[in-house]
Amino acid sequence: MFAITHTFKRFPIRASTAIAAALLCVSIGTAAPKAPRVQTGPDAEITYDGLHRVDRTVMDAAWVKPDLDLTGYTKLIVASGGVSFRDVRPTNSRRATEFPVQEQDKERLRQILREEFVEELEKLDRYEFVSEPGPDVLVLVGAVIDVVSSVPPDRAGRGGVYLSSVGQATLVIELRDSQTNEVLTRAADRRAADAPFAFEASAPMAWSQVRRLAKSWAGLVRRGLEDFNGV
């Protein structure tokens, strides 16, 4: 989830080159109206590394080892896959709906993500945060990718532009065994930083929606880690 290697309070954030996907397959799916279902049989969608597609989760896409059991894991390493941005060309067109994220805003986005995930993950009771692999240690690799802004950079904060969303991004996460590096679960979720009503574009309002989205994602991750017991 975080782009910069650092240590925050009591748990380490370690850099990672993996920018794949995610953890929250079945556990987070328990919040869905119907129970999640792992695909099996000859028609099952199976990834190259042996993960089975999970249907009916609250994530956009999720995969899991069909025999996964996390009860033996008691410790957690949190690793960063970074934040990446969609390559959007600047434009003055009034019809444009996507805009590049300004350099000064990229770092602020990383900071907000870092703050919200740190705050949520520190609430975890199930896992002890560590920095070294072990037989009972999971690695959580997270990234936010394909970030794009819906706010015209030359109009933001000047009024006259009304928006219902300030942009979109995709959260991608993996849970891995710390010793074998085997991917145990994977999921991805794309969401917009939406407001419940159209608002006049301004920097404070835009950033409040970004923080709202980050807080929502962080809460999903924490609840998933607390509740995941297998499939």
Image (cartoon, grey):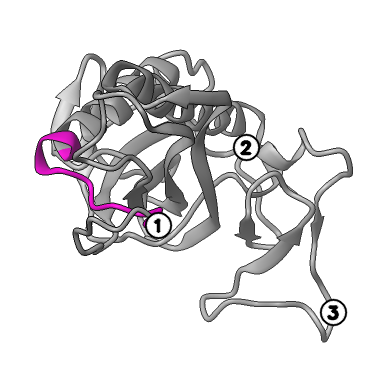
The spot of residue 57 in percent (x, y) is 73, 48
Mark 1 or 2, closer to the camera: 1
Residue 110, above or below 172:
above
As measured in the structure, the alpha-carbon distance from the residue carrying label 1 to the one carrying label 2 is 52 Å
As measured in the structure, the alpha-carbon distance from the residue carrying label 3 to the one carrying label 2 is 26 Å
Judging from the image, what secondary structure is the residue with disc 1 in?
Answer: loop
Residue 17, above or below 132:
below
Q: Is residue 58 part of the magenta span, yes or no?
A: no
| Cβ atoms under marks 3 and 2 closer than 8 Å | no
In the rendered image, the residue lying farthest to the bottom is 42
Residue 11 shows in this picture: yes
| Cβ atoms under marks 1 and 2 closer than 8 Å | no
Which residue shows up at 49% across the image and 52% down it? Answer: 22
Q: How many labels does the image show?
A: 3
The spot of residue 173 in percent (x, y) is 45, 50
Q: Give the range drawn in magenta.
A: 96-106
- Residue position for label 3: 41
Mark 1: which amino acid? Arg
156 displayed left or right of 39: left
Mark 3: which amino acid? Gly
Judging from the image, what secondary structure is the residue with disc 2 in?
Answer: loop
How crowded pointer 3 is (Cα within 10 Å; few <14, some 14-19, many 20+) is rated as few
- Residue position for label 2: 71
23 displayed left or right of 106: right
